[in-house]
Image (tube, coloured by chain):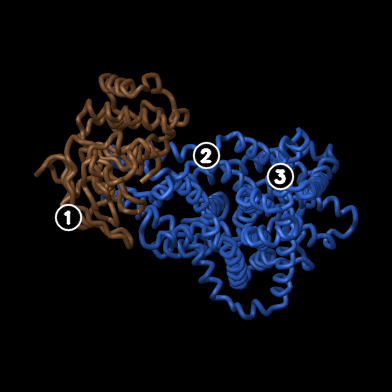
Amino acid sequence: MRDGIVLDKVALKLGTADFDFDCHIEAGVITAIAGSSGAGKSTLLNLIAGFERPQSGRIFIAGTEQTASHPSERPVSVVFQDHNLFAHLDIFTNVALGMSPSMRLSSQDRDRVENALSRVGLASFGKRMPGSLSGGEKQRAAFARALLRNKPVLLLDEPFASLDTDLRLQMSALLLDLHTETANTVVMITHDREEIARIADRILHVEKGQIATDEAKADYLSRFAAPVSALSGTV
Amino acid sequence: MLTTAERRRGIGAGLTVLATVIVFVGTAVATLLAWDGDQSASRLFTAYTWSILRFTLWQAALSTLLSVAFAIPVALALARRPRFAGRAWVLRLMALPMGLPALVGALGLLGVWGRQGILNGWLTTAGLEQPVSVYGLSGILLAHTFFNIPLAVRLLLAVLERLPAEYWLLSASLGMKPLSIFRFVEWPALARIVPGVAGLIFMLCATSFTLVLVLGGGPAATTLEVAIYQALRFDFDPPRAIALAFLQITVTATVIGLIALLPAATDTVRTAGRKALRLDGRSAASRLWDGLIIAIAVIFVASPLLSVLIAGLRADLLKLVTGPRFIQAATTSLVIAVVAAVIAVSASLAIVTARQAISDRRDPDLAARLLSTSLAGTSSLVLVVPPIILGTGWFLVLRQFGNVAAFAPYLVAFINAMMALPFAVRVLEPALNDHRHQTARLAAALGIAGPAKWRLIDLPILTRPTLTALSFAMALSLGDLGAVALFGSSDLVTLPWLVYSTLSSYRTNDADGLALILGMVCLALTILGTSGRKEHENA
């Protein structure tokens, strides 16, 4: 079985919506999932993360079948658009939960948490509560947790959608840095064509519950008439 | 966005309500203060008053502890199982005691836990002799938990269900075990609201009247409210009633003050469009535990309701409803309830409109801000000065003018209106504020004002919350025994008073039938009030 992520004839019915995914997401690259609202982008991510179980088909992640495994058993970390941090826990605890879900930490573990926070630019933020952080800082903390978990796959569900343009640029740069450092497989849902141009290596376009196209960034962007620099709208 | 005339009208209406409530409550309290002050003061610190105060606080504390302690696992189990057959019915069941008159609930509890009740019947068959007593402290605790566990479950469940859906996905993704989920996600969310819920339940139990009157066992199990009633109604000892009334006001004011100090729960909103998906609690042991806890809660709450239904259906309902005493009581109750509901809703609308008019000013001065705060406090004044105290004060006022009975229906209606005021404001204020937020700028931009605005913009939207507030206020008045207890006589018979006097004369079968009718009417009004509410909120 190939590395990366494989969805082998995966089928799922949610209410009246049918989803059929059959695709291979390459290891070590950043793949953007694009498509209109309700097309099935989040369902695809939920299937990989284990939040939804397929009714038929098989899912392989990093060469191992994960079709029936619990989300915590899968070699993935997830960052959502919002609510990545438990609002009532401080930043240190929020990040440390990625290492030990029962918060049994050795002094070495604590050092690793502090290092992860430093790596994302939140060195002195450990004791602060999420409510006192900006949107970008909260996402940095979520990235610190993902970094600490050190899983081969990072799933991002519109992680920068609620940030302003400057912060998006900063966070994109951070994501690229971390990706270069860890060489992990990144799967990111995004509506933003500029973001795709900036970050992604490949693009999966989802339509009506299926993968409509799977193409390299250059092919995807060439389908749009306007040059990338002039694009500011969303897909 | 309001015109100057609209603002003036709004503030004027609010001032009228404020003045009326202050005069009504102030007269009652001033009369208590002025009435034979020396004698009352000397009765304040007797062994009797202290024992009553101690019992009031003790039963309220125990009731609160039991209610919250049992409600937490039930709420956790229901939150962990967002989809199972019958869940919606379990939640509806948890809403029923809130609309049920306390007297009807007490009869239901007697039917299950009483001397002739189902449970004691089973235990007697099993060879035990009368092992459960429903009178005294145990009965009061049973009754208070019956009414307050469902309330606590709903409040706690709402907090858990408001947690962002991502929390549950993150917990699953991070591999949190049930204990970690409870420690890091569920308990921190509940801990913020548990003190407030406990304070509310303590307040309800400390001011409980009907349940203690029916299930309390003599001086050893009497609360302040019931002791005030007994002092006036049976012993005619105003100084004792006044001393007890002041202790009661001290207790309620202290509890309300403490509740106000508690931090408000954070109103965390679930991420739009993402449905809560719980991946925990899938083990067989967890399913069994949740099923057991939910089943116990359902049996505990449903059995008294079923008992009321079964016992009520055994009575000759046709004969009861065609009897002259029932017709008289039903007519009186209905008239009082309609009058009370109209007063409560009109006053609530005036309070909310006045507060809106004040907040509409660009820079409200100190007097305006003070008025706004006073108006907010007005609606909750009845919580500090409970109905039995208002009744006692006015009872003493009216005695000076001769026949108290002549004024009694008006007084009961007004006290019922005061009781309904906090609930009516709580229903109307968010609805009116939302409506204003959504329409005020557009209406002002289009120049729609006066009757046209009322007909085209306000009426279509505000009809439902107004009807909801009216039906809640009517249900509250119809089921209330507290206000009428002091004034009830052969001339003034309401449905709860008729049930209570029928029960007191040991015509249990008739009392069961009457309780069923009263309970059905109140529940119908509550259901009518809440029907379609969700659709409106989601619109």
Label 2: which secondary element? loop
Which marked residue is nearer to the observer: mark 3 or mark 1?
Answer: 1
Tell me the blue chain.
Answer: B
Where is residue A100, by image quadrant?
top left
**Residue B231: x, y in percent?**
75, 50
> What chain does badge 1 belong to?
A
Name the disc covering residue A61, or none.
Answer: none
Report, in whole angstroms, how far the alpha carbon at label 2 lies from the one at label 1.
46 Å
Where is residue A179, by image quadrant?
top left
Name the disc covering residue B265, or none.
Answer: 2
Tell me the brown chain.
Answer: A
The answer to whether one can see residue B268 in this image is yes
Q: In this rendering, would B493 be left or right of B467?
A: right
> Mark 3, residues whose alpha carbon is within 10 Å: few (<14), some, or many (≥20)?
many
**In front of the other: A131 or B221:** A131
Residue highlighted by disc 1: A9
Marks 3 and 2 in Cβ contact (< 8 Å)? no
Residue highlighted by disc 3: B355
